[in-house]
Amino acid sequence: MRGGAGFSAVELAVALVIIGAIMGIAISAWSVFRVSRQYAATRNRLVAAKNCLEVYASHSRKVPPASYFDARCRAPDAWGHDLVYEVTAAMEGLRVDCSAPNLAGRVLRLDDGDHNATLLVAASYGANGVRDYTANATTVNFRGTDDLPAYVTIHEIYQICCGY
């Protein structure tokens, strides 16, 4: 400011550049926060869907059928897309026999190296709303996708149904 005449154009430009940079950082941080909040909300909904499926299994001692998931457990993810349910046809509605395990050879294998005895999966298609994961009769692969899974393993289903 010179002689009380106000700010020069250069001083105003510098101030606007600084304000713009601060706004850009704030908007970027808000965007990251919003996306992480959506993923957290979807994970919470997947946990609720998993718990819903586990309630069915504990009361009926059966692997939940897709119709149960559709009627009782389905919910939208944070992006407004319905959660989906993956279970092999051989498993759907199968009674869990606590005296003689009968689930061998009928499981999905999550292709992540950690969960090779997965009975069922509830999933969100993620932010893009497109099924990016691959699934066939025996394997579900979530690697490299924005899709989110919640799964129940053989150990968990026996723990829920049989107490061990």
Image (tube, rainbow, N blue to C red):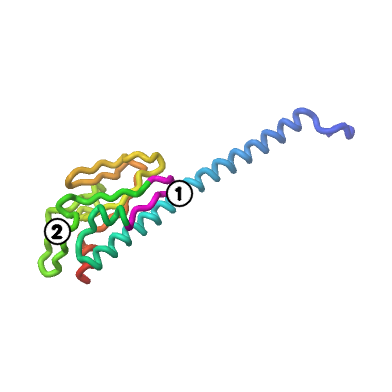
Q: Main secondary structure of the magenta part?
A: loop
The residue at 29%/45% (across/down) is 142
- Name the one closer to the observer, 161 or 142: 161
Q: Is residue 75 magenta?
A: yes
Instruction: Identify whether 109 is placed above or below 19.
Output: below
Give residue 155's position: percent from left, percent from top. Answer: 21, 63
The residue at 36%/47% (across/down) is 82
- Indicate the amino acid at tag 1: Gln
The residue at 47%/51% (across/down) is 37
Disc 2 secondary structure class: loop
Instruction: Identify whether 124 is placed above or below 6.
Output: below
Query: Which picture quadrant has residue 93?
Result: bottom left
Give residue 116's position: percent from left, percent from top. Answer: 20, 53
Instruction: Identify whether 136 is placed above or below 4.
Output: below
Task: Assess disc 1: are there few (<14), some (14-19) or many (≥20) residues with their C-alpha within 10 Å of its C-alpha.
Answer: some
User: Which residue reaches farthest left?
Assistant: 100
- For the record, the magenta segment spans 72-81
Give residue 132's position: percent from left, percent from top. Answer: 31, 39
- Name the one closer to the observer, 48 or 60: 60
Indicate which disc, 2 or 1, sits on the residue closer to the N terminus.
Answer: 1
Q: Quadrant of the C terminus?
A: bottom left
- Indicate the amino acid at tag 2: Leu
